[in-house]
Amino acid sequence: MGKRVWLRRQDLKEVLKTVIPLAAVLGLIALGLRILNLVPPYLAPEEPVQTYATVEEAHRSTGVPVYLPAYFPDYLRWPPEEVRGWTRPQPKLSIAVVLRESGQPVLWLEEWLPLPDEPPPEVPNTAQIVDRLTLALREGVDAEVVAYKGTDTQLYYRLLWDQGEVRIMVTAALPYEELVRMVQSMHPLPSY
């Protein structure tokens, strides 16, 4: 019996000599990827909604190509008040921008990779639709514009369009001309 126990211990030592270094290497790789924020979203054990410190961080984590306005009125505060991202059921990010003076949210940018044949999102069911029109952003790219009043009686404009593989929705409580100028100046954030 003493010899059997010794053999089992010897076998266990041999197995551990192989398993421990392998586990350590895999652990270091996982830690390195996590630090670099390069773990593919479908492998990362994360919550459905994440809050990010920067737009760039949300872009890297969700994989959503990001479009931002080159023109940005000085009465809006940048960096954004809130940047959130989802990886499930489809990659999406949301950016909330506030007024510089009051801190009141007035601009929301949402960008996502739509599912095939995904219909556009509905205007909030509590809204009173004031107008619907189509706006030519640039050649071959049109935005659907919906003007509506919310339950707070504030007038909002929602612009929705597809830019390549990305669906972009901009909602704002800003003057229409200012919003159009911002949207027409949107360009892709460089990829990392």
Image (tube, rainbow, N blue to C red):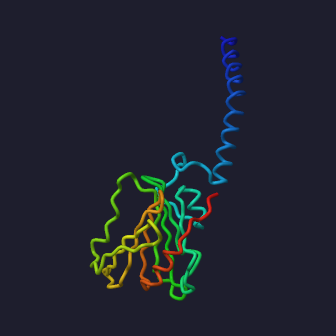
The image quarter containing residue 121 is: bottom left
Above or below, 39 against 171 in this view is above
Q: Nearer the viewer, residue 11 or 139?
A: 139
Above or below, 155 against 21 in this view is below
- List x then y, in percent, for residue 149: 31, 81
Q: Nearer the viewer, residue 40 or 70?
A: 70
- List x then y, in percent, for residue 110: 46, 67
The image quarter containing residue 65 is: bottom right
- Left or right? Give the position of 45 relative to 37: left
Residue appearing at x 53%, y 75% in the figure: 185
Residue appearing at x 35%, y 84% in the figure: 154
User: Which residue, as the protein is rendered here, is positioned at the far bottom?
Assistant: 101
Quarter occupied by the C terminus: bottom right
- List x then y, in percent, for residue 49: 47, 59
In this figure, what is the number of numbered marks? 0
Quarter occupied by the N terminus: top right
Residue appearing at x 28%, y 78% in the figure: 129
Above or below, 123 against 176 in this view is above
